[in-house]
Image (tube, rainbow, N blue to C red):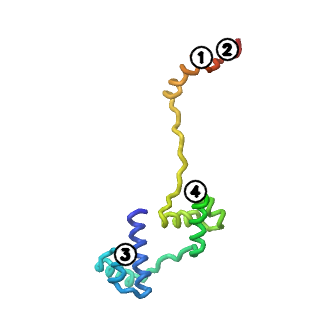
Amino acid sequence: MSTMQQRLTTCGQIIALREEGLMVRAIADRLAVSTSTLERWIRRYAETERRPRPRLTTGDEDAAIIAAIRNNPFSNPVAIREALHLDRAQTARSRLHEVSIQQRVPAIKERLTDQHRTGRLPAICGGGPGVLVASNLHG
């Protein structure tokens, strides 16, 4: 998670806990953030009246996304989106990132260069043990 994402997540948690009625000191202890930082974020939030974007999934859908990747670890967010009929694959990616499950990227084979190919030709054309040479097939 990037620093900006962590910051927004922390700010969202602060606002949510404050709206639940927790005192600034209790929030600071819970989130390990200084009280001056909390007060600044709360003040900025009150000044702008910005509300966080509502979640696109419910708690049950979040649990289903996590269960889907744990049941099939070689799956990907697009497959999860299709299986669970979600609107966007990014939603599945976001829920996986929240529980520290990173998207899996398949291994990519190194492309052969001309140098690789020319290095392999003597072994193939030299007629080593167990290798058929093309000239033996036609003659």
Label 3 vs 2, first from the N-terminus: 3
Q: Does residue 71 sit above or below 115 in this rendering?
A: below
Residue nearest the viewer, comparing 70 with 39: 70
Question: Which mark is drawn over residue 73?
Answer: 4
Structural distance between the alpha carbons of marks 3 and 2: 75 Å
Residue tagged 1: 127
| Residue 42: x %, y % from top left | 36, 82
Front in this rendered view, residue 51 or 124: 124
> Quick check: 28 left or right of 123?
left
Mark linked to residue 20: none
Badge 1 element? loop
| Picture mark count | 4
Asked whether the residues under the numbered discs 1 and 2 touch, taking CB atoms below 8 Å apart as contact, a structural biologist would say yes
Q: Are marks 3 and 2 in contact (CB under 8 Å)?
A: no
Whichever of labels 3 and 4 marks the residue nearer the N terminus, that label is: 3
Distance, label 1 to label 2, CA atoms, is 10 Å
Mark positioned earlier in the residue sequence (1 or 2): 1
Residue placed under numbered mark 2 in the picture: 136
Looking at the image, residue 135 lies above or below residue 15: above
Name the residue: 37% across, 75% down: 31
Give how far apart the Cα atoms at labels 2 and 4 are.
49 Å
Which residue matches tag 3? 31
Mark 1 or 3, nearer chain start:
3
